[in-house]
Image (cartoon, rainbow, N blue to C red):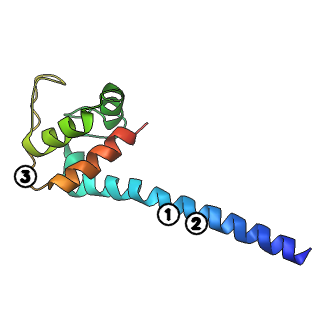
């Protein structure tokens, strides 16, 4: 009985630990978005100056080239997609960081 209980506790601990481990990148990318000032104009679930990240994820969900397009927009800026207000270039974001941000944005539900 004790052995079975120990196995159950260990299994649950491992499962919960794995969940926390795999969830960490999502938080890390939200933190990166904050650090790189994305949240000054965007929010996860509501439009501010720019579109909500959920809306971006929905719009680009089936676009195979979305990752490259959005990473470029993050770094170089752009206009005309979400209304009259242009997105300014963000030169403080590296290409690797832009890819991380895009991966996170496209995963937002």
Real-space CA distance between mark 2 and mark 3, rounded to the nearest whole angstrom: 36 Å
Q: Quadrant of the C terminus?
A: top left
Q: Residue at x 14, y 56 (%)?
A: 94
In the image: residue 16, left or right of residue 26:
right
Q: Residue furthest front?
A: 64
Q: Mark 2 packing: few (<14 Cα in 10 Å), some, or many (20+)?
A: few
Residue occupied by mark 1 = 21
The total of numbered circles placed on residues is 3
Q: Residue at x 21, y 33 (%)?
A: 50
Q: Mark 3 packing: few (<14 Cα in 10 Å), some, or many (20+)?
A: few
Residue occupied by mark 3 = 91
Q: Please, is residue 14 above or below residue 58 in the view?
A: below
Residue occupied by mark 2 = 17
Instruction: Specify the quadrant of the image occupied by residue 3.
Output: bottom right
Residue 14 makes an appearance in the image: yes
* Front residue of this view, candidates 48 and 86: 86
* Front residue of this view, candidates 94 and 27: 94
Q: Please, is residue 106 above or below residue 26 in the view?
A: above
Whether the residues at callouts 2 and 1 have beta carbons within 8 Å, the answer is yes
Q: Which mark is residue 77?
A: none
In the image: residue 58, left or right of residue 20:
left
Real-space CA distance between mark 2 and mark 1, rounded to the nearest whole angstrom: 6 Å
Residue 62 horizontal/vertical position (percent): 35, 26
Q: Earlier in the sequence, mark 2 or mark 3?
A: 2
Mark 1: secondary structure:
helix
In the image: residue 22, left or right of residue 107:
right
Whether the residues at callouts 2 and 3 have beta carbons within 8 Å, the answer is no
């Amino acid at each position: 009985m004790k052995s079975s209980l120990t196995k159950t506790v260990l299994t649950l601990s491992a499962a919960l630990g794995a969940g926390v481990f795999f969830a960490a990148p999502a938080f890390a990318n939200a933190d990166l978005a904050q650090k790189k000032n994305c949240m000054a104009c965007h929010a996860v679930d509501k439009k501010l100056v720019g579109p909500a990240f959920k809306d971006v994820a929905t719009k680009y969900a089936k676009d195979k080239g979305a990752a490259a397009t959005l990473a470029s927009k993050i770094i170089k800026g752009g206009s005309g997609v979400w209304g009259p207000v242009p997105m300014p270039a963000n030169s403080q974001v590296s290409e690797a960081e832009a890819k991380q941000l895009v991966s996170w944005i496209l995963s937002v539900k």
